[in-house]
Image (cartoon, grey):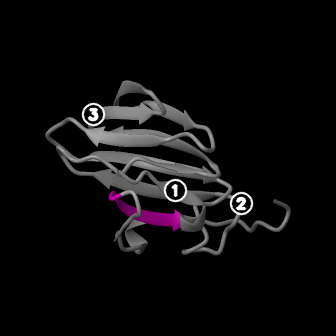
Amino acid sequence: MKNLKFLVKRVEDYKPFKAVDGSDVVEVIGMKTTKTKEVSIAYATVKPKQKTILHKHDFTEVYIILKGKGIIYLNNESRPISKNDNILIPAKTWHQVENTGKTNLKIICICVPAFSERKTNLKKF
């Protein structure tokens, strides 16, 4: 990481897009926005009564729940989640988030190394 440069970015400076898992995402640091390969930070929104597509990555991911409540599915387990929860998702772990609340579920997603669609697998039913 010796080649990393100091950055300050604001989420308001970027437009949301539909992520491969179905959530609405704003990437503030990562390969698409800042050409950063070592880490990515994105803000994800899952709307009420919706869930992301079951998926896994070849990289580690951390979720920080900012707002709302729901359920996270990790491999064959499920746990309730809500504001201020921090979730470590090891590489190659199948995971999915369901919003069980009446407001948007807001999540900070941190990936190490940075998020890559090529290193993401979606569960096909």
58 shown above or below 96: below
Mark 1 element type: strand
Name the one closer to the observer, 9 or 3: 3
Residue at 55% x, 42% y: name it: 62
Q: Position of residue 24 (x, y in %)?
A: 33, 61
Inspect the image, locate mark 3, and give the three-letter code of the amino acid beneath it.
Lys
Badge 2 marks a residue whose secondary structure is: loop
Check disc 1 and report the residue beneath it.
121
Quadrant containing the N terminus in the rendered view: bottom right
Q: Which mark is residue 69?
A: 3
State which region is magenta: 22-28
| Residue 116 in view | yes
Q: Residue furthest front?
A: 125
Reading the image, the residue beneath label 2 is: 38
How far apart are the alpha carbons under marks 2 and 1? Answer: 20 Å
**Earlier residue among tags 2 and 1:** 2
Residue at point 71%, 60% (across, down): 38
Marks 3 and 1: CB-CB under 8 Å?
Answer: no
